Amino acid sequence: MTPRAQPRLSRDLHPVAWWIWAVGLAAAATLTTNPLLLVLLVTTAAMVVMARRSDHPWARSFRLYLLLGLMIVIIRVAFRILFGGASHGRVLVDLPAIPLPDWVAGVRLLGPITQEALLAGLYDGLRLAAIVICIGAANSLANPKRLLKSVPPALYEIGTALVVAVTVFPQLADSARRVRAAQALRGDASSRVGRLRRFLVPVLEDALERSLSLAAGMDARGYGRAGTATRGQRWTTGVLLLGALCGLCVGTFAFLDRTAPRWLGVPFLVGGVVVAVIGLVSAGRRVERTRYRPDRWRLAELVVAGSGLAVGVVIWQLGRAEPLVVYPSVSAMPYLSVLALGGALLGLVPALAAPPPRQPISTPLEVGG
Amino acid sequence: MIELRDIHFAYGAGQSEEQRPILRGIDLTLEEGELVLVSGRTGVGKSTLLGVLTGLVPRFSGGTLSGDVLIDGVSVIDQPPRERAHVVGYVGQDPVAGFVTDTVEEELAYGMEQLGLPGDTMRRRVEETLDLLGIADLRNRDLRTLSGGQQQRVAIGAVLTTHPRVLVLDEPTSALDPTAAEDVLATLTRLVHDLGLTVLLAEHRLERVVPFADRICLLTGDGGVLVDTPAVVLATSPVVPPIIELGRAAGWSPLPLSVRDARRAARSLALPAPVVEEPPAGSTVLSARGLTVAHGRNVVLDGVDLDLRSGHVTALMGRNGAGKSTLIWALQGTQSRRSGSVSVAGRDPGRLDAAGRRALVGLVPQTAADLLYLETVAEECAAADTGAGGTAGTCRGLLDHLVPGIDATMHPRDLSEGQRLALALAIVLTARPRVLLLDEPTRGLDYTAKAGLARIVAELADDEHAVLIATHDVEFVATVADDVVVLADGEVVSSGPAREVVAASPSYAPQVTKILGPPWLRVDEVVAALESS
């Protein structure tokens, strides 16, 4: 008897793993202008999405991100044509420049279109598009609500507020559709302001009523129950978090401002982070709330997050080792090295390593067969 | 035990003249494992009384509250709702509005997460609750894809997981079709019997709930309450289900509360056959043939044929999600159709602009408030007149004819449900359509308001209008409808005269038909027969 290959068990990956993977890819995209590499990164993200997305409504949003990326590229190139740019290089089409008055000196409308200007616009646009698409991939792979739920317990209230906000938008669209249809059932008001008002008033009333009943429902179900923390404990947490915020601000400022004393920079930044962690843990400890079936961090999560980070690190290192691959000149044909190709393809690992997602509606059990 | 002691509640603060008292010195004791029904006319404070127990009144309603609420002898009146969450479970009127998460399982766990229960306890209780309510197969479903009855059961399950002592429900069956309502009520009865849960529920449709209630708490309207067994309270109550009206008319004592008891009592009645008035033949005003509507690949309506005749009231019935609203909007012309034809006086409303449609077909949507946007009734009426190009005062005249005596300076939001519906109806009628479509008009109406609506609908029919009403309310259908069309899964499964269609279906039969058998339909027919014999 030969052992039959068992199908992979479906399971939802920890949303944070998908986000780390996507941020790694996006970081790689920010570090390069090589169009081949960028297209490779986008393809990688798209293939992983195709392989591992579920049938939930938010999973279908990836197409929108692709469209958005395409629009970014087109707009970027169009602006290069409209506002000219480099005046040297190989001229493709010699458009006449539109003369502008003196007070807009430095801006040129139209004018000759050079191959270099076009390519620079294209590369730039591609880079931005790749970043947007990578983030979009994370959004379609990981339920945004589950991600918000993974916030530390101390930030739970903010997380819930965001979850509710995310839920409200589709409802608002629903209610807008309903009111628009209903308003067509009665006579038309004359002015434009009147029409806006007759549309907005019922929609806003509806939204207000809905939020009140949601608040009442949440309150009745125990949202925001007072914990057992004493006054002293609350003070400690507050002071810790405030201190952390100050430390982080000073540290960031000193780190970025080269004229500030060096001892202000990194130490304050690190100190701020440490105090923030202590504060969050202290705040989290007094929260008497538990989580139902929290997402667990297992091997697959490690592999997925690691593969994304690896892509970022490889491309970053390439920037030093092979700068011509990562930042190709606009006057020569861009090319890929084996390292760059391999680095980008590392991002494909989740397509195999991640378990297939659970589908919203389970298919009926097949009996027999 | 749960005790309300000398509860006073009034809107408006202090002793000013603005103060509007709702509850005056209410005492109510809820025993363990009983189902208490809160009844009374619209606006007497049923929801307020429920809110006092949950703590949502006065925190979410404003107003001043005095008295005391005791749970096992401990006063909780100063505690906010969240601190009572482990004792009092509350399900609001619209379950969807109270959902916080997006899948069934997470929703069931939400309350327990707030209470900080350990993980394995949560896991166990979620499984138990899924089985208890018979929703285990829905566990991973998105809450918004569920049917109304399923959503209501999930909402009940979501508060049950925290193991409350008392469950408070505000109109749990008002949006449900008869079968789904029976499911929900059967679930509640089971909880009362098996778990010893105390249930306090407010409901307009007494015919659905009375057989399950142990006691009724009747709000008398002057701020007081009458609490006793159903038979005692219903003997004098101003709001009663048809079965009690029948019992009163026939002089049965004690009053039968269930259809089974009434049937036994009815054996002694010797009634002449009812005089059945044939509605006037009328001419076909609206005719739909082969109407098919699809959302994407989902077929919502599949080849529906429908005729609406002038002077006839047609009821459109069917499960939640059977396509009733879609059919109404497709007949009106806003909902685009895949194939088929609609013709009103030789014209197709789907091909006209909004103004043309309004003149042919009037529609009052499910939430009548969507139509209203101004601050006073007078402004709404004036806007309707200019909008329809009619003479000033047309709309107000119609409104006075429908419901006389509405104060012109009132804000439409402050009107009662019935008055607001009448205002929306008057606005729609200002364009003088021959066909009138009403989508779920009886939601939130008490028996008096429903009788008022029935009178309005009958007058419109006498005025040669063709009226179509989509509704779940079988008793209302028995009162107004000449014809009934039943939709299931987008197809017409039965249609014909009301008397034949409702008698043939156990879930759509009104109480009088269940008790006396066809062709009896309404209490007034029985009363007339009793008087003549």
Image (cartoon, helix red, strand yellow):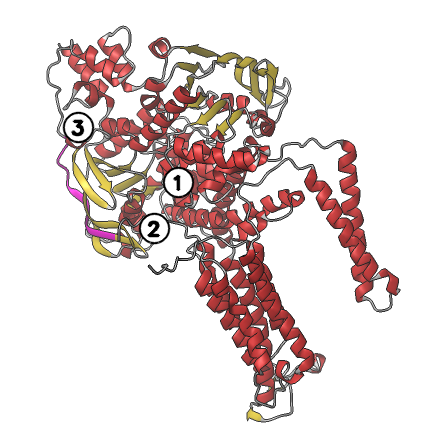
Left or right: where B166 falls relative to B442? right
Badge 3 local density, few (<14 within 10 Å), some, or many (20+)? some
**Disc number for residue B354:** none
Q: List the residue tagged with mark 2.
A: A363
Residue located at (72% from left, 33% from top): A229
The Cα–Cα distance between marks 2 and 1, rounded to whole angstroms, is 60 Å
Q: Marks 2/3: CA distance?
A: 39 Å
Of all residues, the one furthest to the left in this rendering is: B273
In which quarter of the view is residue A106 placed?
bottom right
B98 left or right of A222 in image: left
- State the extent of the magenta-drawn residues as a range: B279-292
> Mark 3 to mark 1: distance in Å?
46 Å
- Image spot of residue A78 (x, y percent): 55, 79
**Foreground disc of the pair 2, 1:** 2
Position of residue A184 relative to residue B33, above or below, is below
Label 2, residues with CA under 10 Å away: few <14, some 14-19, many ≥20 = few
Q: Where is mark 1, residue-wise?
A: B392
